[in-house]
Image: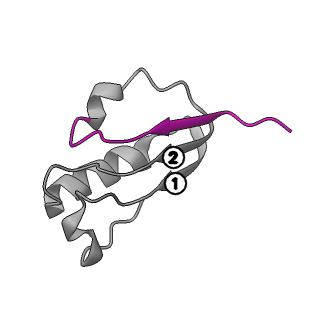
Amino acid sequence: MKYILTLISDTHTKHKVLNGDLPGGDIILHAGDISSMGYEHEITQFAKWYNDLNNYDHKVFIAGNHELYYGDFHATI
C-alpha cells in the first residue's frame, strides 16, 4: 500500500505562504516550530489554518522548541 505523505516544519507563523503549494494526500506532518515565540495567538492561528486544510486524510503536529506556550494551551487541530 502506498501513501502520499507531506512533511513540513519551521514555518514560524509563515504557514499561509504554503497556501496553494501543498499537494494534498493521505497524511501531512508538521514537525514543529509553527510560532516565533509560542504566543497563544500564533498557535491559535496555525491551528485554524491546519484544521482548515481539506486535502489531507490525516494531520499530525509535533510541538517544537518554539511552542513555549503549548504546554498550557490546548488547541484543537
Residue 29: mark: 2
> In this picture, is 25 found above or below 69?
above
Which residue lies at the image location 13% right of the left edge and 56% below the top edge?
Answer: 37
Quadrant occupied by the C terminus? bottom left
Residue 11 x, y percent position in the rendering: 29, 39
Q: Quadrant of the N terminus?
A: top right
Q: Which amino acid, mark 2?
A: Leu
- Residue annotated with mark 1: 60
| Magenta span | 1-14
Residue at the location (28% across, 26% down)? 17
Q: Quadrant of residue 4?
A: top right
**8 in the magenta segment:** yes
Q: Which mark is residue 37?
A: none
Residue 73, position as x, y percentages in the image: 26, 73
Dot 2 surroundings within 10 Å: few (below 14), some, or many (20 or more)?
Answer: some
Q: Residue at x 80, y 35 (%)?
A: 2
In the displayed orientation, state which residue is furthest to the bottom.
72
In the figure, is residue 11 to the left or right of 60? left
Q: Is residue 64 above or below residue 19?
A: below
Relative to 6, is 66 above or below? below
Q: How is the image coloured?
A: one colour
Q: Helix or strand or loop: what does disc 1 sit on? A: strand
